[in-house]
Each structure stands twice: as C-alpha cells, then as structure tokens.
Image (tube, helix red, strand yellow):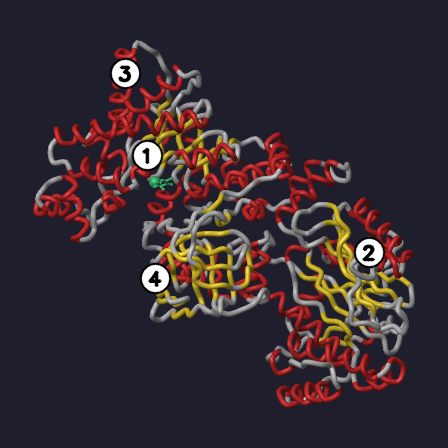
Amino acid sequence: MPKYLTLTDYALITNSAPIKRQTHGWRAKCLQRLVRLDMPVPMTIALSFGVVREIATGAQMTLRHLLGHFPEGQLLSVRPSAEHPQWGGPAAILNIGMNDAMHEKLTASHGEEVATALYLNFVQAFAQHVARLDPDMFDADKPTRAALDAALRAYEDEMEDPFPQSVAQQLADVLRSMARAWEGTSARLLRQAKGAPVDAGLGLVVQAMAGGMGVGYGTTDACGVGMIRFIDATTGAPQVMGRFRPDRSEETLFLTHDARGPSLEDRSPEAFTQLLAYGANARKRLREEMEIEFTLEDGKLWILDAVTVPRSSRAAVRVVVDLANDGVILRDEAISRIAPKALGELLHRQVDPKARATVLGRGIAASPGAAAGRLVFSSAAALASAARDEPCILARRETTPEDIRGMHSAHAVLTERGGMTSHAAVIGRGLGVPCVVGASNITIDARRKTLQANGHTLNEGDLITIDGTNGLALAGEVALLEPALDDRFTTLLDWADARRDIGIRANADTPADARIAREFQAQGIGLCRTEHMFFEEDRLTLMREMIFADTSEDRRDALDRLLPMQRADFIDLFEIMQGQPVCIRLFDPPLHEFLPHSREGMRFLADALDKPLSEITRRAEALAEFNPMLGMRGVRLGITLPEIYEMQARAIFEATIEVTRRGAPIVPEIMIPLVSAMREVELVKSRIDSCAAQVRGRAGVDFDYKLGVMVETPRAALRAGDIAQHAAFLSFGTNDLTQMTYGLSRDDAGRFMSDYVQQGVFAEDPFHTLDEDGVGELLRLGAARGRAARDDLTLSICGEHGGSPEAIRFCRDLGFDYVSCSPFRVPVARLAAAQLVI
Ligand code: PEP
Ligand code: MG
C-alpha cells in the first residue's frame, strides 16, 4: 500500500518562519533572507529534506492544503534547494498550472502567441524532466498552435494518458520526479565529488510565478525577465553583468548603458538603481556575490530568486579574498569557503600556444585545462593506467554513469558526441578533468580500440593531448604551460599557511618537479625517488648497465659513471629548494621496470653495452622475478649490493658540501625504502655513516645529515619501535603499504577494482582513498610505537594519499609532522590542512 502523505508539513517563507539551511536547503534559506532584506519576493513555500525524502519513496500526496495559499489560476515554479548550492539538484520547472483552460484564458488576455508559447514550454519541460520522454519528440522550431497540439498528442501517445490538466496532479508529478532525480547515481556521485555527504538531503521551493497573474508576460515595454550579477563569473572581478528580455520584444537588453544598443539602465533607470542597491545589500548581508533573477511587471520589480553566482574556481578565490579584504567575512571564513579540490582547476596546465601541434579534431571546450597521456577506450583501461601511475586520456563515443570511475582516473576525456550539458561535460567539469565533447569529426571505435580523425588512426596506448580550454584533440604529447597563479590565490594560501599546523612537502624527483614544488611553496621535498632520475633514455642505459653487471668490478665501473650525474642532480635539487629539507630515497627500482622487455630492447642494450645478445638474454633471465614488486627491491638491493647505496650516499654528501660552500647550507635527509627488519636499517646506517666519515675526511669539511626509514611493509609498521631506534624519521609509503596490507597488486588491481567498488566490497579504491580502517590501523600502530621509542621522531606520509584532504586529517590526528604529495596537490593540501584547524 503506498503511503499517503497529506502535505501540510511545509513552511511559508516569511520573515519569521523556522527555515534552516540544514532542513530546507540553501535556496529556501536564501529566499527567506531576501524577504528579510525587504526585497519583493512572490509567495514561496519550502518543503523540507524529510518531506522530499518521503515524496521520493512514492508517498501519495494531497496538495489541496498547500495550493490553498495561492490564488486560483496562479502559475507556479518549483526549484531545488540542497543544503549547499554547489551540490546541484534537478532542473527547475516553471509555469506549473498551464493547461487547456489557462491557455484559453491567457489567449483572451494576452493573445494566442503568448499563451501558446507558455503552454508549449511547459509541456516540453514536463515531458522531458518529469515524464522522462525523449526530448527530440518535443522539439519545435516555433511555438505555434500546431506545435502545441503535436506536443500534446505526442505526450498522450507515449504515456497513454492525456497531458495532466489538474494543477495538483502536475505539481505532485513535478515534486515526485525532482525528489527521485536527487536519488539518482549520477546526481549522487556528482554532489559527493563536491563534498556532499552520502545522505545529503534535498529541499524544494514552490513559488508563485511573479507579478499580477504570475505569467511573466506583460502588456507594456516595462515588463520582462532578467538576471543581474555584480562580478565577472570567470575572473571574479567586479562588473555588472546579466541580461534583460522585455516580453514584447525579441531583443535582449544590455543591463548598463551601452552605445551598442538599448539598456535596462536607460529604459527603466529606477528599477536598475533599485537592483544595484539590492545587489550591494545582498553582498553585505548575505556575505556572498549573488546573482539575482528578477521580473518587471509594468515597471514593478519582483525578485524571484538569488543564487550565489556560479563561478570558476579562479573567480571563487577572488570573491572570498575580496569579501575578506572588504571586511564582509573573516579570513578564516574565506579559507573554509573554498573546497580544496576546487583549487585543482586553477592549477591546470594549458597547451603552450607556441607549441606546434597537429589538430586531430575539434569539439566543445567542456572542461578547462590540458593534459597529455596514453589513449584508452574503456573505464577499466583508465583505472588500470591510474593504478600504474600512467597518465591516460579516456576516449568514448559518449559517457554514461558507468564511466564515472574511469573519468576519475583519466587525465582528460574526449567524446565524439554530446554538448555542453552532456554527461561527459557535466561530470568532467564536476571532477575538474579537462574534457572535450562532441568532437564529431572523430570516430571512436571502442571495440577495435581505434580513433580515426583527420586522416590519422590512433590505437590504444598512443599518445594524445586534450585541450579542454579550446576544445581540441591534438596528436602526440604537446608541450604544456604550467598554470599562472594570481595574487588572490597566493593571498588565500598565505592566510591558510598562517593557520595550519601540519607541514606540507612535495614528492619531487626532478629539478622541474622541485621548481613547481617551490612555486607552490612546499616546505621541502618529502620524497625524491632517485630511480626516477634515470628514466631518460641515455641515463636508463647506464642504469641498466649497473643492474646487468655480473661482477662487482663491472658494477663499480657503472656506478663511477653514475656518481657525477647523481651529485649534479642533488646539487640542483638542493639549490632549487634553497635550504628547505630534501628527503632523498635511496634506489628502489622494481627490477622489471628496468629490464628490457622485447627482443629489440635486448638487442639495443647489447649494442649499448657492447655485449653479445646471448649474454644480455641470459642475464635478463637470471634477474627476472616471479613477483618483482615483492622481490629484489629497495633495501634488499642495498643489503645485497652495498656499493649502490654507497655511491648514492657519497653523491648526496658531496652535493651537500658543494651547496654549503656556495652559501646555501643544507641538512640532507636520506631515506631507506622497503624496510621490514631493524637489522636492515642497522646495516645500511653503519655503511652510510662510514661513507660520511670518508667524505668528511677527504674534503676536510663537516656536515650533518638525517637518516630515516620508509614504512611500506606491514612488518615495518608493527616493528616501528625497534626501527625508530636507528631512524630520525619514519615516512609511511602508503602505496606499498596498501599493496601489502591488502595483498593487492598495485599494477593489476585496476582489472577488478571497479567491480569491487561497484559491488560495495570496497567503499573506495584503497590506492586512491586511504583505507583508514586497515592501512590506517598500521599507521596508528607504527606512529605510536615509533614515538614511544623515540619522542623526537619525525613522522610523515609520502604515498599518493598524502595530498588528499581526508588523509591529511587522519595523519594530523595521529600527530604527524608533515604530509608529502605530488607538487600539483600542494596548494590543495595547504588549504585542506588549514581547514582542519578552523
Ligand atoms: C609508497 O610505496 O607509498 C611510495 C611512496 O613509494 P613508491 O610509490 O615509489 O613505491
Ligand atoms: Mg614504495
């Protein structure tokens, strides 16, 4: 039996009604504030989250009581009212109450054209959003009587019921469909990406369409609908913008006086002045930049709605900084108003305009920023790339809700179909992923894994660049420009720095990374993966030579040639970081990443090393491991082949002496990877100590350094107390720690992760979101045991989780000294850390 809901539990929006954002949503609260600011708001009724939830579950409604507040024949609108404006909500539905009788009445009073346009608009909106019929069936070029009749017929054919004529029925259907839309998967994932909790509620606002009969179609020139805002939504700079469309005219008026054509300011100066005053008052009293929707009804101004101006992240930052500088809000509020993840959009790279690029296709610039990566054609492939830490571009004909996780993992998205409000575009913007949609000259064949465009055929794995700012797909990996950061951005982050109480460092392997880290004001490098310094072709060969060496002598020879390169690398890093701490991790090369895989690769190496191919093949076979991620990695290499770590230690110490001599003294931090036993640390430490003594003796110069351990194995976390006796710091490497805690391969988990998440086995991909219950328990134990053994122990996290606001909260609660994350996440981390204090 369906539940029967007599809708009496609603609130009339008046000065004193008990409307709260937490119960009725942001819009209802805002409308009440407008009423309190003495703005002329038409009769409005707010439904609470609880009521809307009941409506969604299918409760039957009787609306007589509610409708009793509106005069007979009053047209109505319904708008969503979530707790936070950024959490979105279903599209507003206007002109509820239009039916055959109203059409006749309006034809008599306003003419057939007006009546038909209103009725047709309503039928179209109702069919699409409420009855969920195919919008194409209701397309009409012009609102003619024939088009209206056709739409009514199409509705009746599809629904096997005539278009509802009763206002109560129309309103009930609208309320139910909006309540249900809120519960849909896409809506839920989108709002969660904006920080909404799982159980976020939706309120609904029912309002009389403004003025007189509430039609919005007046009989004189001083009638019409408009919107005004007081900032530029892209930059946030002060500027009056918006539009006004008089009912009796096809043209849209400028708002402010403009030589190019008529303006509201010239036509209705009083209303315009009134709007400016309302805007200024709203900014001050609502402490926000508002966009005000209004109507003029024979010169009388009605305020229908005000929403915070939808804005780019750049504008959002400027607005809060300007509001704080104007004394409208406090700095702390400015800090807490910006979602840390939104800063990501400001940090996007752009295609270097000077770069030469081949355009594969053009589409709609749906989400800004640019990214290059390897082409993938499915979400599963995107997830697998992300698990390998390999940037990828997801190409789909169009995306569906099943693709959201893939889009999350991709660096950019390209679709063949779709427009600015297509799924891919909406989700892309929501997630801050550069996105080009509707690139119709491109043919994407997901089955064959090919992309054809402009005479080119690309296969899965080929490099492609997406320019989401200009709507372009470009061949290959095109040079990108780092983002320019304006002074409002810097100011906000300076304010955040003044508040936060946990350090933020960057993971940086190369001088380029280190420069970005500096620019984003990281407080040092928390992880320099030294093996990543050897990924370039010429260096890679030398690294392979060292790995392939059969004898100690051969290895030493290769190491002697690696030493000056490493020393130069470290000098560079130390100089760029200008005395800030730099934590260098000794080699941790999973061997399979450094072995040639193909016959051709073997031949190339044989040439490079001047050795017979058979010897290279034999050595590669000897070095091959069944399970390389658990094999000869990290400290195991250091224990078995001590000369490697000795070379690195020497390079670090000699670089330290050199930069100190140049006037930028530094205390380097050396970190041992993949430790599982205290004895490993003891052995490596004594060798590094003696290397330091040698370098000191030879150079006749003293220097200091710190030795620490990466906690990446469960055993290291459990035995953190022993390990801390030989370590000045512990840094939790949550990538390997997650891999080993779950027994889940970092490189292969992508294959089944989406199934696992979809079926609710894991709430989230644990390589993406720190598993606080399991991996987090090891962090908790490790931190407590380490600190108990040594109270001056420095604690940090340097796995990929280090930049996520949730992980920062977790680590801060455990008393960590700092988090380290990729350079681009440093600003996000700085803001997120400050929000934890406020
Ligand atoms: C880790 O394991 O968390 C880590 C930072 O090291 P890598 O990702 O290089 O294995
Ligand atoms: Mg690791």
Q: What's the distance in space between the residues labelled 4 and 1, CA to CA?
A: 30 Å
Name the residue: 52% across, 59% down. Answer: 471
Q: How many marks?
A: 4
Judging depth in this view, the residue of 380 and 472 nearest the camera is 472
Q: Are marks 3 and 1 in contact (CB under 8 Å)?
A: no
Q: Secondary structure at mark 1?
A: helix
- State left or right for residue 537 relative to residue 580: left
* Amino acid at circle 2: Gln
Q: Is the CB atom of the residue marked by disc 2 within 8 angstroms of ligand 1's nearest atom?
A: no
Where is the N terminus found, in terms of image quarters?
bottom right
Q: Position of residue 470 (x, y in %)?
A: 54, 56
Q: What's the distance in space between the residues labelled 4 and 2, CA to CA?
A: 54 Å
Residue for badge 3: 695
- Report crowding for label 1: few under 14, some 14 to 19, many 20 or more residues within 10 A (C-alpha): many
Q: Residue furthest top?
A: 700
Residue for badge 2: 32
Residue for badge 1: 530
Q: In which image quadrant can residue 6 be found?
A: bottom right
Q: Position of residue 403 (x, y in %)?
A: 47, 64
Question: Is residue 556 positioned above or below 696 on the image?
Answer: below
- State left or right for residue 364 relative to residue 460: right
Q: Position of residue 789 (x, y in %)?
A: 40, 25
Question: Is residue 447 positioned above or below 157 on the image?
Answer: above
Name the residue: 41% across, 25% down. Answer: 574
| The disc label shown at residue 460, or none | 4
